[in-house]
Amino acid sequence: MKTKIRSNQISDQELQEFMNKNCKLLSSKQLAELLHVTEGAIRKQRSKARSLFPYAKLGGRIFYPADLIVETLHKNLTQSQAR
């Protein structure tokens, strides 16, 4: 079951306050900068249902929980092999 937050239930200021105090949510742009990829690459992965990172859509905006990004990156680490 997905929970939907309607845009009239929470103001932009309340959303920013929540993001800064209670949790760290990254926008697509912030995630792209963090991973050194384009925002379009992040968007394309979402549209093709191939995104490695869990995300939430709130009021038409996409957010990625920072703690789950770190967890996902750690799960997908590979060891380099010497030749």
Image (cartoon, helix red, strand yellow):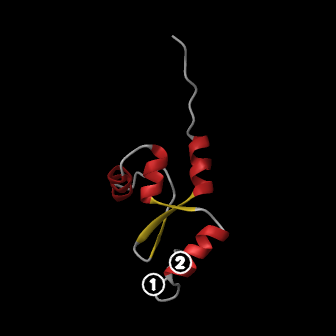
**Residue 59 falls in image quadrant:** bottom left
Whole-percent x and y of residue 47? 34, 58
Q: Is residue 64 left or right of residue 46?
A: right
Q: CA distance from mark 2 to mark 1?
A: 13 Å
Extreme residue toward the bottom, this view:
8
Whole-percent x and y of residue 21? 66, 70
Q: Which residue is mark 2?
A: 3
Give 8 or 29, whichever is nearer the viewer: 29
Q: Residue at x 59, y 69 (%)?
A: 19
Q: Nearer the viewer, mark 2 or mark 1?
A: 1
**Residue 36 falls in image quadrant:** top left
Q: Which label sits on residue 7? A: 1
Q: Which label sits on residue 70? A: none
Q: Quadrant of the N terminus?
A: bottom right
Packing grade of label 2 (10 A; few <14, some 14-19, many >=20) is few
Q: Residue at x 52, y 88 (%)?
A: 9
Q: Secondary structure at mark 1?
A: loop
